[in-house]
Image (cartoon, grey):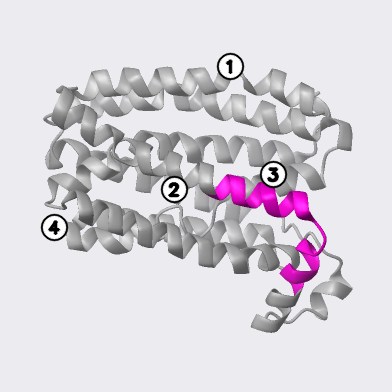
């Protein structure tokens, strides 16, 4: 099946896999780094609230932008903000300097929805969810090694402290810049709408409001699903956010133990992807 896939789908799977490998390396250390630079529990919660709020605002516009603008340019825009965020992580000497980083990092452009749009646009209907499941497995296989590699790096540079964690951001900015260059050179321009629709499109507040109104009108199940996802994801995110901090500060977990626990969590999620994808198809 993989040989039959469109080149754009293959490229997306590969590039996003490397991208999320880097994201996974950092995932359990961002909050720890923020705390080590002096942020309190309230500060951490408030900064992440601002990041989530900003992401929600961008998502409202992004749904329309992705319909009428090049997906390649949108992906590059997201990577640009990720690279810029890494610079704040690298040079920060207090937690205040990390606020812009948390507002930009993975928040401006969410890569997975764009990847899924590419999958849906360039695969057969009966294969779409299977391809999505396959992509998650491939990304998961790459991510499985990320926490342990991060643990080795952190331990090598002195353990869970500012000096031990900071090298991860140097590595990540190199990965993000490399991905940016590869996408810029080799990735094709991808549009979801016809050229005539793109020429006639004007982005303004009225078009967004009326567009969403028309989209959800009469779709009770869709509205209920949105509410369920908001409640589920909100509570889940709030509990997961402080988990690394709790493990390190109250349970005495070191970098390697944290890496092992994260690897187990990734592997557990990984196992369910293919059967769920087949059932959905």
Q: Earlier in the sequence, mark 2 or mark 3?
A: 3
Q: Earlier in the sequence, mark 4 or mark 2?
A: 4
Q: Nearer the viewer, mark 2 or mark 1?
A: 1
Number of other residues with Cα within 10 Å of mark 3, as a class: few under 14, some 14 to 19, many 20 or more? some
The answer to if 72 sits in the magenta stretch is no
The residue that label 2 is drawn on is 176
Q: Earlier in the sequence, mark 2 or mark 1?
A: 2
Whole-percent x and y of residue 30?
29, 44
What residue is rendered at 60% in x and 24% in y?
A: 137
User: Could you tell whether 50 is left or right of 32 in the image?
Assistant: right
Q: Earlier in the sequence, mark 3 or mark 1?
A: 3
Q: Earlier in the sequence, mark 4 or mark 3?
A: 4
The residue that label 4 is drawn on is 94
Range drawn in magenta: 211-230
Q: Nearer the viewer, mark 4 or mark 2?
A: 4
What residue is rendered at 48% in x and 55% in y?
A: 79
Would you say the residues marked 1 and 4 are in contact, meaning their CB atoms lie under 8 Å apart? no
Answer above or below: position of 158 versus 116.
Answer: above
Q: How many marks?
A: 4
């Amino acid at each position: 099946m993989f040989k039959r896939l469109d080149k754009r789908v293959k490229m997306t799977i590969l590039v996003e896999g490397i991208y999320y490998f880097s994201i996974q390396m950092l995932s359990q250390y961002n909050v720890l780094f923020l705390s080590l630079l002096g942020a309190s529990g309230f500060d951490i919660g408030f900064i992440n609230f601002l990041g989530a709020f900003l992401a929600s605002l961008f998502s409202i516009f992004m749904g329309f932008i992705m319909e009428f603008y090049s997906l390649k340019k949108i992906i590059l825009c997201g990577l640009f903000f990720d690279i810029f965020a890494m610079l704040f992580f690298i040079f920060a000497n207090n937690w205040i300097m990390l606020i812009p980083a948390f507002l930009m990092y993975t928040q401006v452009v969410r890569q997975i929805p764009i990847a899924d749009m590419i999958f849906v646009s360039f695969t057969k209907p009966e294969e779409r969810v299977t391809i999505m499941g396959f992509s998650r497995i491939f990304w998961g296989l790459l991510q499985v090694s990320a926490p342990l590699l991060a643990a080795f790096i952190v331990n090598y540079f002195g353990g869970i402290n500012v000096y031990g964690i900071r090298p991860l951001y140097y590595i990540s900015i190199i990965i993000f810049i490399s991905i940016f260059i590869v996408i810029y050179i080799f990735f094709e321009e991808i549009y979801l709408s016809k050229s005539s629709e793109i020429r006639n499109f004007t982005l303004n507040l009225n078009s967004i409001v009326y567009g969403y109104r028309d989209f959800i009108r009469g779709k009770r199940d869709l509205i209920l699903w949105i509410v369920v996802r908001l409640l589920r994801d909100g509570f889940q995110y709030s509990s997961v956010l402080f988990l690394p901090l709790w493990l390190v500060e109250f349970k005495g977990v070191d970098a390697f133990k944290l890496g092992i626990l994260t690897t187990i969590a990734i592997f557990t999620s990984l196992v369910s992807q293919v059967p769920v994808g087949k059932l959905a198809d």
